[in-house]
Image (spheres, rainbow, N blue to C red):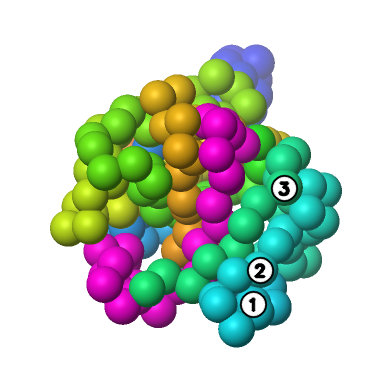
Amino acid sequence: MWHMKTLFLSMVVALPLLLPTWGQAISFYDTRAAWEAAVTGEDDVDLEIPLDEFGVGSLPAGDPLDLPLGGRKLAFDIDLTALQVGVSWATWGGGNTPRVLYTGLGMTDVKGIFDIPEIAFGLEMKPEIFDTMSMTLTLDDGSILTQDVDGSESGEALFFGWAGGSVASMTLSCPECTSGFAFGRMVEASGVVPEPASLFLLGSGLAGLGFWRRKRA
């Protein structure tokens, strides 16, 4: 009988240890509100890039941005132009207040590399051309989120975000955006809210351990 008790105890103890791995499955979110409900400790990325009198700046390829949480840095593989969103383009999540990064003419994709893998991150994207374009967020494990985004003056920039996993790089793409595209309103989070099923399993494991101890006593 001792071996059955040992097996049961091993299963009960191992269950909570496995939960962090199970809970790291990547989930995508197409609205910031839904993403914020799924994460903890979120904070906006401040694009501290100097702009000239015309509201234009630059972020050279490889120059890292400081992220607000965990001491992470994020660098991109192409030169980007920093822009201040104009008052007539209040279609980003922050109205006309955010600075955004623009890929440039003919640049239809950009890769972002985290120096420390990221657990939860999001941003908004919008094409430069006045038309609806298919835009995609691709993570380093091959997971993708694709949305059709309206690039007109009245079209809303859309949110692309994920939570879970351990993401070392992401690629933003818009194959038909020959005029380039912009992205901004970046945000990261320090944690992910456990799913109800994971909480139930964790509770069951702890309850089972308590039951085994009472039986043993």
Q: Identify the residue under disc 2.
A: 57
Is 124 left or right of 89, judged from the image as shown? right
Q: Around disc 2, counting alpha carbons within 10 Å, would you say few (fewer than 14), some (14 to 19), or many (20 or more)?
A: some
Along the polypeptide, which appears first: circle 3 or circle 2? 2
Q: Residue furthest front?
A: 54
Q: Identify the residue under disc 3.
A: 79
Q: Is residue 143 magenta?
A: no
Q: Identify the residue under disc 1.
A: 51
Residue located 40% across and 79% down the image: 97
Q: Are marks 1 and 2 in contact (CB under 8 Å)?
A: yes
In percent of width and height, residue 6 lies at 65, 24
Q: Residue furthest left?
A: 154
- Secondary structure mostly seen in magenta is loop
Tag 3: residue type? Asp
Tag 2: residue type? Gly
Is 45 left or right of 201, judged from the image as shown? right
Magenta segment, which residues?
87-110
Tag 1: residue type? Leu
Residue located 24% across and 38% down the image: 131
Alpha carbons under labels 3 and 2: distance apart: 11 Å
In percent of width and height, residue 21 lies at 59, 33
Is 112 left or right of 173, judged from the image as shown? right
In percent of width and height, residue 136 lies at 42, 30
| Residue 176 image label | none
**Above or below 71: residue 11:** above
Alpha carbons under labels 1 and 2: distance apart: 4 Å
As helix, strand or loop, the secondary structure at mark 3 comes to: loop
